[in-house]
Amino acid sequence: MSELLAGPIADRHAALGATFAEFGGWNMPVSYAGTVAEHTAVREAVAIFDVSHLGKALVSGPGAAEFVNSTLTNDLRKIAPGKAQYTLCCNEGGGVVDDLIAYLVGDDEVFLVPNAANTATVVAKLKEVAPEGVSVVDQHREFAVFAVQGPRSPEVLAGLGLPADIEYMAFADAELSTADGPKPVRVCRTGYTGERGYEVLPRWDDAGAVFDTLYEAVAAAGGQAAGLGARDTLRTEMGYALHGHELSPEISPGQARSSWAVGWDKPSFFGRDALLAEKENGPARRLYGLKAVGRGVPRAGCAVRLGDTVIGECTSGTFSPTLKQGIALALLDTASGVKKGGEVVIDVRGRDLPCEVVIPPFVPSHV
């Protein structure tokens, strides 16, 4: 087994008392004060996540934006420079190689943020078909990423002189004053929690100084550091897909309810023919939310039954700190006739857990 990669501020996490675990090949902080407390801080106040493990790649050169638009699913022509867009990199069978955020800097520059474990694959796939003059560069360890999330996040950023009053999915380049001097950062109003929030991207070598400054402001606003545990419960409550769970090379956007991120009218993108065929015929399975009726916590991999028939399995499952009940995301066979408001049963270690079928999110979004 290869050695786990470390982010740029592992010492800060250790000093804050973090527990660690492997995620995407990286040694990541899972929690500090406890997942429920960190989850609640995001929903009610503010918290900061270190997600520097996320990939970064730069596509540049004449026609770079049009090239990206001809490969990834969403339509970059729908946004203007200074905006970011959720998009998918698919394989020829229509499965999802990765989901990522594309920052449109200009016609000749697109900055991509893929998932950690898939960065090299996405970069290689784009490089293989890039036209002459367009370069695709892996910048995985050139930038850090800190997510400041929660209803008090605007006041945290504004208090530091960072752009807080920007539209959802807009980004701006700015300068953050730190104890180590001014540091350039890119700020995007996005996140993975369902709350108002921002992702702040400094240079990798500036990560320590930037984190210290952000963390101090978050703590002053009644917030705290949060780890992967809270990140997972927050995104599950919102029904946000996690690659390797709700999305994978074997799971299409249509199955994962991510068809909104496909530019169906575009003449080309990876997997277009397969996705159009599935759209016409309808997906064989579809993602639903399952809300436990009784006590019990579903987990990924648990079988889902309608009567005595297995109709799918949970892709994610957790205890919802907001609802105080078990919730799950599950891919269910469309031929089963299951629909919103129906009831199914999850097999949790041999015990039946009745659940209501819902369409995510489980809790309201405040982005």
Image: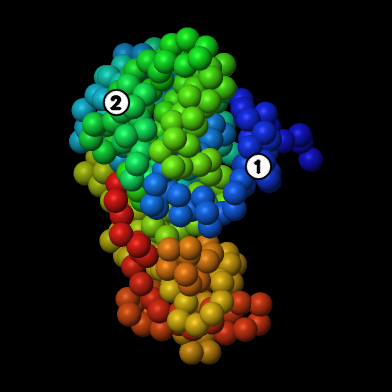
SS assignment at label 2: loop
**Can the viewer see residue 302?**
yes
Query: Is residue 141 or residue 212 the one in the foreground?
Result: 212
Q: Tell me where residue 62 sits by quadrant.
A: top left
Question: Which residue is depicted at the point 41% across and 38% down?
Answer: 221
Residue 113 in percent (x, y) is at 45, 32
The residue wearing badge 1 is: 18
Mark 2 residue type = Pro
The image's colour scheme reads rainbow
| Other residues around mark 1 within 10 Å, as few (<14) / some (14–19) / many (≥20) | many
Residue that extends furthest to the bottom in the rendered view of this protein: 307
Residue 266 in percent (x, y) is at 24, 40
Question: Which residue is depicted at the point 53% across and 57% down?
Answer: 36
Contact (CB < 8 A) between labels 1 and 2?
Answer: no
Residue 191 in percent (x, y) is at 39, 41
Residue 102 in percent (x, y) is at 36, 32
Mark 1 residue type = Ala
**How far, Cα to Cα, is label 1 from label 2?**
29 Å
Query: Is residue 353 or residue 136 the one in the foreground?
Result: 353
Question: Which residue is depicted at the point 57% across and 34% down?
Answer: 53
Up-down relation of residue 58 to residue 38 (above or below): above
SS assignment at label 1: loop
**Can the viewer see residue 113?**
no
Question: Which residue is depicted at the point 45% across and 81% down?
Answer: 293
The residue wearing badge 2 is: 163
* Mark sitting earlier along the chain (1/2): 1
